Image: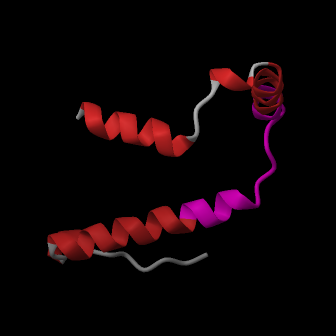
Amino acid sequence: MAHSAIDYHKLSVPERILLVEEIWDSIAEDTLNEPISVLHRAELEERARDIKQNPDSCQPWKIVLERIKKSL
């Protein structure tokens, strides 16, 4: 795949931020189609078992995020 060279030094800060966001989004899109490694799958399965066995040990993300924001 051919790419044109970008002289990012000539871009404004907002333009560079946009470029980085676009690159990051393209990486995220590409990784969505990659298979989960055996190690990651095992970790996810272990965490799912832990949650089923001990559901009170977890908190919803919204609550965790609120607690983090309050601590800042």
Is residue 64 placed above or below 27 in the rendered structure? above
Look at the image and say whether residue 68 sits in the magenta stretch: no
Q: Is residue 56 left or right of residue 33?
A: left
Look at the image and say whether residue 42 sits in the magenta stretch: yes
Near-viewer residue (18 or 51): 51
Majority secondary structure of magenta residues: helix
Q: Tell which residue pokes out farthest to the front in this image.
A: 56
Near-viewer residue (40 or 57): 57
Where's residue 28, x and y in %?
A: 58, 60
Where's residue 66, x and y in %?
A: 38, 41
Near-viewer residue (38 or 1): 38
Residue drawn where x is 84% and y is 32% of the image: 38
Residue drawn where x is 37% and y is 75% of the image: 5
Placement of the C terminus among the 4 image quadrants? top left
Residue 31 picture quarter:
bottom right
Is residue 3 placed above or below 72 in the rendered structure? below
What colour scheme has been applied to the protein in the rendered image? secondary structure
How many numbered marks, from 0 up? 0
Where's residue 34, x and y in %?
A: 76, 54
Residue 71 picture quarter:
top left
Where's residue 70, x and y in %?
A: 28, 36
Residue drawn where x is 80% and y is 23% of the image: 46
Is residue 57 placed above or below 27 in the rendered structure? above
Residue drawn where x is 55% and y is 68% of the image: 26
Placement of the N terminus among the 4 image quadrants? bottom right
Q: Which residues are magenta?
A: 27-43
